[in-house]
Amino acid sequence: MSVDLSIEIGKLSLKNPVMLASGTVGYGNEISEFMDLSKIGAIVTKSVSLKPRKGNPPQRIVETPSGMLNAIGLANVGVEEFVKSKIPFLEKVNSTLICNIAASTIEEYVECTRILHSEECIKGFEINVSCPNVKEGGLVFGNDSSAVGRITEKVRAVTDKTVIIKLSPNTASITEFAKVAKQEGADAVSAINTMVGTSFDIYSRKPKIKNITGGLSGPAIKPVALAKVLEISRNVDIPIIGIGGIMNWKDAVEFTICGATGIQLGTVNFINPFAALEVIEGMERYLKEMKLGSIEELVGTYQL
Ligand SMILES: Cc1cc2nc3c(=O)[nH]c(=O)nc-3n(C[C@H](O)[C@H](O)[C@H](O)COP(=O)(O)O)c2cc1C
């Protein structure tokens, strides 16, 4: 019996629900040495901004129990250089490309999307309104549902490609943000970005991360991410992409049951670059074992 792993998000059809999360595989070139990228559902690029960004000074990453803190600060080459030097590689990889966009003003989000819309190999956009590691933009937007609404509406107006709004867990009600995103025309939401955390050295009494706080990711945040996906799924009729601490196929299945149409792998890519392929194989085996013909039959089938 063959199983159908394909999913639809807006106009976008993916061969399977497994994507590589923004910021954890750069622009895909490093991880392409380890895996055949054509096998995965989609690559989500590192956040691209209108102008190049140096990001935060080091130390920018520290390991924590069951996870890691990062405060990269959206370091990236900027949209112009991205088109010139990164797109040619990404065009050659036979995988679906979703471009993640970050900005510090609404106009920048729109301009960046407008420029990238004309790149044929980019099939969709993930709008990062939720980075905890930048002073401007990031959580300022992620914590203001009317700003998220305006960003969604204005980005929607310049592209008919799939638009995904990446939500922050660092808010009182993620449901409110998912509702606004849907109302203003988003095709899907992704949840979650990292959670604000910190870590101190007890001898120097200094933060281990120069930025003082960073974004917590990895298995430590999985129960939070799962609860957020379930919350959105119970309250808003919009496709959800589950992200947060997914380490193996069982985690991916758990997110799917809780309402995620697609899932993204982030921190695990640093530990096991083959994880995405293992997750695809594991999900397929599980569906066969459960005698389900497609992944769609599993989405949101939680029994409360
Ligand atoms: C080193 C690092 C860099 C990241 N950079 C970005 C980024 O540029 N844009 C973004 O939207 N999310 C970024 N993220 C967040 C991830 O895409 C993901 O939402 C988060 O890590 C939770 O998933 P995980 O627990 O599987 O890592 C980054 C995460 C890490 C660990």
Image (tube, rainbow, N blue to C red):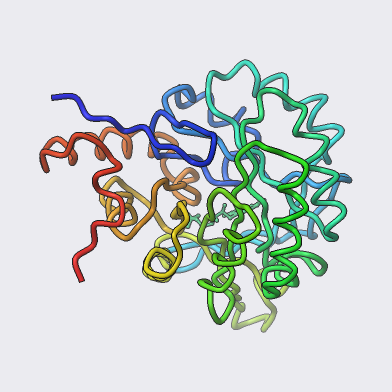
Residue 40, x across and y down, in percent: 44, 30
Q: Eyeballing the image, is 204 above or below 217?
A: below
Q: Position of residue 80 (x, y in %)?
A: 87, 33
Q: Nearer the viewer, residue 41 or 135?
A: 41
Q: Residue at x 40, y 61 (%)?
A: 219
Q: What x and y, as percent, mark residue 52?
A: 86, 45
Of the 4 image quadrants, the one containing the C terminus is: bottom left
Up the image or down, 60 lies above or below 87; here it is below
Extreme top residue here?
92
Residue 77 image point, x, y percent: 81, 39
The one of 44 and 53 positioned closer to us in this rendering: 44
Which is nearer the eye, 2 or 264?
2
The residue located at (69%, 79%) in the rendering is 206
Quadrant of ligand 1: it is bottom right
| Side (left or right) of 226 relative to 89 | left
Number of numbered discs present?
0
Of the pair 190 and 187, the residue shown nearer to us? 187
> On the rendered image, what quadrant is the N terminus found in?
top left
Q: Is residue 204 left or right of residue 136?
A: left
**Residue occupying the point 47% across, 43% down:** 269
